[in-house]
Amino acid sequence: MQRRSLKLFLVILISSLFSFSLSADINWFTKGVPDINAEWGYSFLTRRDLRNQTPAEEFALGFDFKELRINTGIKYQYNQLDLTNRVIYMPTLNNAFQAGCGFTWHFYRYFDEFKENDLIFNARFRWLKGPVFSFENAVGVMFKFASIDVIREYSPVIFNFTYNWELLCNWHLFNRSDLWCALNLQDTYDYPLAISPFLKFGFDFATTPNTIIGLDYTLKFVDMFFSAVYLNESLLRFTFKVAI
């Protein structure tokens, strides 16, 4: 009985999705030259944790095809190196919605101590309210593969599994500035296993059509859903972005 109900549910779901795809205006890929940008960032700790103890410098490169977005970035600070690559594909529906999937690979090396590889797979949704407002949400899973230098001979790889969740709201104001906020379980260069949310606020301003300066502030909490809320880290970051 349960198998029949499941089969019926799948048939109805597939039929509904197929019917919707026939009636909806779907843009699978926007042809042409993508928007390419390069970004430099520098962050200061206003409250530090054990992982991040010094200022850090970042370099990133982004390619935006509208439905397909590709980003790669590197962050360096004393004795630590992060490398993050992200690919997001979301077809556009009726010029108002985007739905698809994303993949992230993050590599972290604490020199002479340990290294980590994080793989994230998620489903994503984005709502576009004209050129003024956008809301983006993602939910998925993260796989962490760690290797500790001193025990590598006995235990080469330590495997762990956790969840991924992202939420971003962005307001585009006066055609030259963005005001945004985000709530994530992982950050661009920080991927904890425990549920340690990152609450972020940011402001970007276009000084010229091809140049954007930005300022954002990050609050990292620990045990927010299990016990008393504890502010583990806060970070202030300056960014400078240019269109290529």
Image: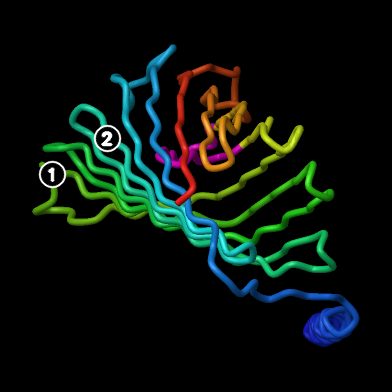
Residue at the spot of label 1: 149
Residue 122 percent across, percent down from the top left = 58, 60
The numbered mark at residue 76 is 2
Q: Locate residue 140: give its quadrant.
A: bottom right
Disc 1 residue type? Asp
Q: Is residue 9 above or below residue 157?
A: below
Position of 218 compared to 85: left or right? right
Camera sees residue 132? yes
Disc 2 residue type? Tyr
Relative depth, front residue between 207 and 76: 207
Q: Residue furthest front?
A: 208
Relative depth, front residue between 186 and 67: 67
Q: Residue furthest top?
A: 46
Q: Is residue 188 magenta?
A: yes
Label 2 vs label 1: CA separation? 20 Å
Image: magenta residue range: 184-196
Q: Secondary structure at mark 1?
A: helix
Assign the magenta stretch its main secondary structure.
loop
Q: Quadrant of the N terminus?
A: bottom right
Camera sees residue 221? no
| Residue found 55% across the figure and 31% down from its top | 198
Residue 229 percent across, percent down from the top left = 59, 19
Q: Residues within 10 Å of mark 1 (few under 14, many from 20)?
A: some
Q: Secondary structure at mark 2?
A: strand
Front: mark 2 or 1: 2
| Residue found 72% across the figure and 57% down from its top | 125
| Residue found 78% across the figure and 47% down from its top | 131
